[in-house]
Amino acid sequence: MDDERFWALIDEAVERASRTGGASAVAGSEVSDVLVDRAAPDEVVRFTRHADVVAGRAATWDLLAACHLIDGWHSDDAFRDFRDFLVLAGRAVFERAVEDADSLAERAPLVLGRRDGRLAPEPVDDLARTAWARLTGSDDEDDWFEAVAAAAPEAGGGSGGAGLRGRPWESWERREYDSRLPALVSLVGLRG
C-alpha cells in the first residue's frame, strides 16, 4: 500500500467522523467502516502494515514530549497510542505535527479532547482487524495475526525500537518544554 491510498482511506474516515464530532473529530470505528466499504481483506492487511510505517514517522523526541504534555505521562505503549491518535486525526494534522510538534496547539479542540480523555480511539491495528473480521467472517485473532505475518513487510518498517528521530531533549524540565513547545505548554500547561 502506498501513502496516497492509506491517507485517502484515513481521511475518508475522518470526514465521516467530522459529521458528528466537528473540529475535534478523529476517526475511530469509521476506519473499520471505510475499510469494509473500500478494501478487500488482503488490502486491509497491507493497510495495517503501512500504518506501522506511517506511525513510525511520528517517533520523534518532540512528539514524545508532546505526548507527555498532553497525556500527562508516557510509556512505549502510550506513545504508540498517541501516534495512532495523530494518524486518526488525518493526514494534514499528522504531517504538520511530525514537522512541528508545537503546531498541535493550533488544534485546541483535538488536543484538549485527548487531554481530558474524550478522544482516545482504538489503535489502528484493532480497527483494521475489526474490518478484516467483517470482510472474512473470521473473528479468530490467530487468523488475523497469521494473515499479517504472511504479508510482506512494508518498506521502511515501523518505529520498532530503533530510537527517536530529531534533536534529543536535554532534560524534561519546564525550561525545555517552554523552549521547544511553547504554544502547547500555553494551551495545556505542564503537569507536575
Image (cartoon, rainbow, N blue to C red):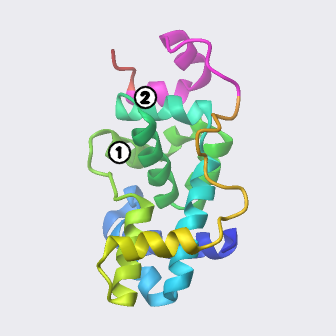
For the record, the magenta segment spans 167-188
How far is mark 2 from mark 1, CA to CA?
11 Å
Residue found at x 49% / y 76%: 147
Q: Secondary structure at mark 2?
A: helix
**Location of residue 124 in the rendering, given as x and y in whole percent from the top left corner:** 44, 62
The part of the image, by quadrant, that contains residue 117 is top left
In the rendered structure, which disc, 2 or 1, sits on the residue that comes first in sequence? 2
SS at circle 1: helix
Look at label 2 and name its amino acid.
Leu
Which mark identifies residue 114?
1
Q: Foreground: 69 or 64?
A: 64
> Which residue is identified by label 2?
69
Q: Position of residue 125 (x, y in %)?
A: 44, 63
Q: Amino acid at mark 1?
A: Arg
Quadrant containing the C terminus in the rendered view: top left
> Crowding near pointer 2: few (<14 within 10 Å), some, many (20+)?
many
Relative to 57, residue 45 above or below: below
Whether residue 173 sits left or right of residue 5 in the image: it is left
- Prevalent SS, magenta region: helix
